[in-house]
Amino acid sequence: MSNSIDIASVGRNWRLDGVTVPSPSDVVTEVFASDVLTMEELRQRLSKPVWRSLLATTERGDALDPAISDTVALAMKTWAMEKGATHYTHWFQPLTGLTAEKHESFVTPTSDGTAISQFSGKELIQGEPDASSFPSGGLRATFEARGYTAWDPTSPAFIMRHPKGAVLCIPTAFASWTGEALDNKTPLMRSMEVINKAAMRGLRLFSDTETQRVDATVGAEQEYFLIDEEFFFRRPDLVMCGRTLFGARPPRGQELEDHYFGSIPDRILTFMTDAEHQLYALGIPIKTRHNEVAPGQYEVAPIFEQANIAADHQQLVMQVLKNTARRYGLVCLVHEKPFAGINGSGKHVNWSMATNLGQNLLEPGETPHDNMQFLFFCAAMIRAVDVHQDLLRTCVASASNDHRLGANEAPPAIMSIFLGEQLSEVYERLLSGKGGSSKRSGLLGLGTQVLPKLPQHAGDRNRTSPFAFTGNKFEFRAVGSSQSISFPITVLNTIAAESIDALSSAIEARMKKKQSFEAALSEVLKDTYAKHSRIIFNGDGYSNKWHKEAEKRGLINLPTAIDAIETLNHEKNITLFSSYNVLSARELEARQEVMFDMYFKTVNIEGETTEWIAQTQILPGALRHLREMASSGIAITAVKRAVDELSVAVDAISDAIVELRKQNHELGGDDVHSKSIHMRNNVLPAMNAVRTAADALERITAHDHWPLPLYREMLFVK
Ligand code: ADP
Ligand code: MG
């Protein structure tokens, strides 16, 4: 008894019953953000003075006035209960990269045997989850065991629904009692202030006196796989690790390319529609959906939002996709590489900066003045990526993303910028001082060419660059599909701010020496480009040629997550984060510790799971087949051949299991750093050897003796 799935029934065990979808016009008028406590909703429920005080906090970043908290809490509770919520939770983002919640009932029993509903300002502002088992990288150990959660009034509260009820979720930061960040949101919020300050400084240089605030904006595209849950539950590797640890390549992979942007199967489309409606209710502006490159792979993308909110929403997107899939007999896999040899999943983080007046600072302008401003901010990004290649690599480093980065379909582990030919040419001209080109018109009077109007969707979109300029924003493509986007955004905000400051300082220094702003700007742009243009690469990032070229240019290559994480506490990075008050040295080192720890634990679990499945499922299955053949009494060549082949392959996997078991027993030292090195250097290769042996066996073992659903089943039965 092994692989007894009735394949014919798989893919049919879902029903459309009970799926009701609102009409498109209802979505616009009634559904969108209906489960979000919007500022407008709050305005109607609060007195003017309270409302104004709250607005000062959410819009200008003023400290929250504790006096208004009870009133706001009451309004929130009333709204939530009207929506059917029975509980509330402080919703936070521990360093696991996931979200955490601890539900508290609104209902409080009283001494006279009745109950009242209660939710005070104190409970709104601060919570105390029993958080001793969240990773803290040692930050908590030395001080206080517990951490506390603190309301983030800039991200709206929302209702999370489940089949039998609803919960009010209050976005919160999570910190130790000494005020050190234990989460992903706190540094992100700090970095939003940092980018605001630096960009405002830059804008003032351009004589902008109108803009009051600059926010980072983010739109994150999410790639994911869907497989039938029948298969999922028969794959202990998927259940334990989120990826398959075994599986021979199917006869057909993605060679036919008929899946990419192909028509979406009914079951999938219904799932998507359902998920989107829930996301709409949460105020998440989902815009596009389509099939991705690999069979069974899809993508969803929202319209961009203020980065802190986008990060909260991104967590919800993953959660809603996963929960909704189950209603359709599907399981949503957000792992970076669920299937070896098949395209992995990324999360493209589109990043830009926007003023409170709606101007996108990375949008090439119509006028020479706007263009120079654009070139200024864009040059700052070129400098930022060059100076902090290591940080960009590290903020996407994980055991799971290692299967993707540098593999032949994902952006390489070497950081570079794709600017496109046109924009590169503009900078080149600026550098050489050659102004006019007969092809394009306009001179700024600085001997510089005015930036030609770049097409919104430049034709030469590059899919192989980890960091691509795509017309009016940068697309950070190295981010992993399962990870929180908070730390990548934090890094982007901080390195952008530092570079904007560096350019601003250089301009100001020249102006002090009586250079005009225009001349100073032009010189600084030239200097910046000359110094950092090595980071620009418009070619094929997957090619071997680029690896050699990158080495010649002196770019950093950190092939594995461990190599990258090791750089996180370098002096340069500690100085950057601490000077901008985004992360203290201790907070940064704690993060490094947690990253090593997560790497170690991930591979450790994979190693144990590989050994377990190989030893207790695959080997016995193959042996049963071998025994059947060997004892069949049929003296023909085919049987003899099968016995010979199977014998060799079974011995091979048995040897590989022995080695893996040995490596699994080793701990690799006492600290998480050396443990994770052991995982990378010894456990991963031993796992791969077991897998290679198993995948070879899969091709010669009778299907009814093979214990695991096959790639060809999981990827193609929809
Ligand atoms: P394409 O990838 O075809 O260029 P879009 O330009 O519509 O498609 O954008 C892809 C993603 O980039 C979307 O998630 C979108 O919200 C996001 N995006 C667009 N403009 C910005 C911006 N100014 N800041 C951040 N993200 C943006
Ligand atoms: Mg994409």
Image (spheres, rainbow, N blue to C red):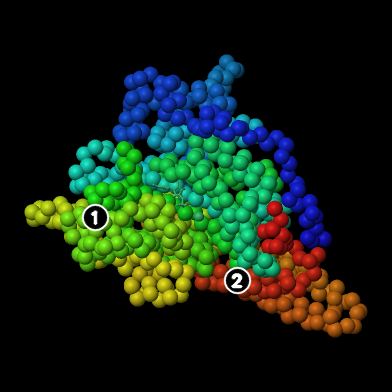
Q: Is residue 31 left or right of residue 673?
A: right
Residue 83 in picture, x, y percent from top left: 56, 26
Along the line of sight, the residue nearer the viewer: 583 or 528: 528
Q: Which residue is mark 2?
A: 688
Q: Residue type at mark 2?
A: Asn
Q: Are marks 2 and 1 in contact (CB under 8 Å)?
A: no
Q: Which residue is mark 1?
A: 442
Mark 1 CB in 8 Å range of ligand 1? no
Residue 402, given in percent of the width and then of the height, sits at 50, 64
Left or right: 68 in relation to 131: left
Image quadrant occupied by the N terminus: bottom right
Looking at the rendered structure, the kind of residue marked 1 is Gly
In the depicted structure, whether residue 675 falls above or below residue 194? below
Instruction: Please give left or right for residue 199 compared with residue 489 in the image.
Output: left
Residue 557 visible, this angle: yes
Sooner in the amino-acid sequence: mark 2 or mark 1: 1
Element type where label 2 sits in the image: helix
Q: For ligand 2, tell me if the residue under mark 2 lies within 8 Å.
A: no
Closest to the camera, between mark 2 and mark 1, is: 1
